[in-house]
Image (cartoon, rainbow, N blue to C red):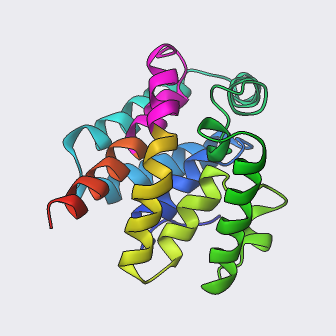
Amino acid sequence: METLVGKDIYTQLASMFDYPGDMGKIVSKVDELINNFSSMEKLPPDVVNSVKEFKKAIVKLPIDELQVIYSYTFEMSSDFTLDMGSHIYDGFKRSDNLVNIKTMYRRFEFPFETLGKGELPDHLPLVLRFLGFVKEEGVKRDFEKDFLIKCLEKVYKNFAKRQDNPYHHVINAVYKIIDRDVKEEANK
C-alpha cells in the first residue's frame, strides 16, 4: 500500500481523489492524512476538520455505494468533474490550456503520462501531484494563481449546494489550501 508519510501536502490530497477500491485502504490513507495534517502548523484550521468529516461520512458507507457516489460525482456531472479547465474554459481556449499544461509538465520532466493513467493534463489529482513534484515555488504559485484557484472556486461553489456528498469535504480542504497559498503569495 502507498504510504503518505514524507509526501507533500498536495500529493497527499491527490490520493483522496483516487477511485475507491478497498475501504480499509481508503480509511488508512485518510487516517494517515489526518495525522500528517494535524502536525502542520500553517494549514487553515478547517482543513483537518474537513478531512475528518470526509472520514466520518465514508466509514458509514459500503464500498460499492462510495464507488457509485464517486462515479456519479466526478464522472457523470460536469459541475463536479475533476477536469479543472472545463470549469472555466470552453472549446479552443480549453484545448490551448491543456496543451500549455502538458508543455509545462514536460518542461519540468513531470511523468504525467504514467501518473495520469490516461487522464487529461488538467485532472485535479494530476495537477496536485504536479504541485507536489515541481520544486520551483514561482511556477507552483503562478499555476495556482493563474489557473487552479479559479477552477476550484467554481467546484467549491458547486459543492456548497451538495454538502450531503462526502467529497465536498475533500474539495473544501483542497480549496482552502490553494486559497491560502494564493493569498500568502499576494501578501509577499
Q: Is residue 142 left or right of residue 62?
A: left
Instruction: Assess whether residue 156 is covered by the magenta stretch.
Output: yes
Q: Is residue 132 left or right of residue 126?
A: left
* Location of residue 146 in the rendering, given as x and y in whole percent from the top left corner: 45, 57
Q: Is residue 102 left or right of residue 35?
A: right
Is residue 164 placed above or below 148 in the rendered structure?
A: above
Residue farthest right in this picture: 118
Name the chief secondary structure element in magenta: helix
Quadrant of the image containing the C terminus: bottom left
One can see residue 42 in this view: no
Residue farthest front in this picture: 92
One can see residue 174 in this view: yes
Quadrant of the image containing the N terminus: bottom right
Q: Quadrant of residue 127?
A: bottom right
Highlighted range, magenta:
153-173
Instruction: Assess whether residue 34 is covered by the magenta stretch.
Output: no
The residue lying toward the viewer, choosing from 99 and 177, is 99
* Location of residue 145 in the rendering, given as x and y in whole percent from the top left corner: 39, 57
The residue lying toward the viewer, choosing from 71 and 97, is 97
At a point 68% along the width and 45% down the height, the residue shown is: 83
* Location of residue 157 in the rendering, given as x and y in whole percent from the top left corner: 45, 24
At a point 36% along the width and 35% down the height, the residue shown is: 50
* Location of residue 74 in the rendering, given as x and y in whole percent from the top left corner: 70, 33
At a point 36% along the width and 77% down the height, the residue shown is: 137
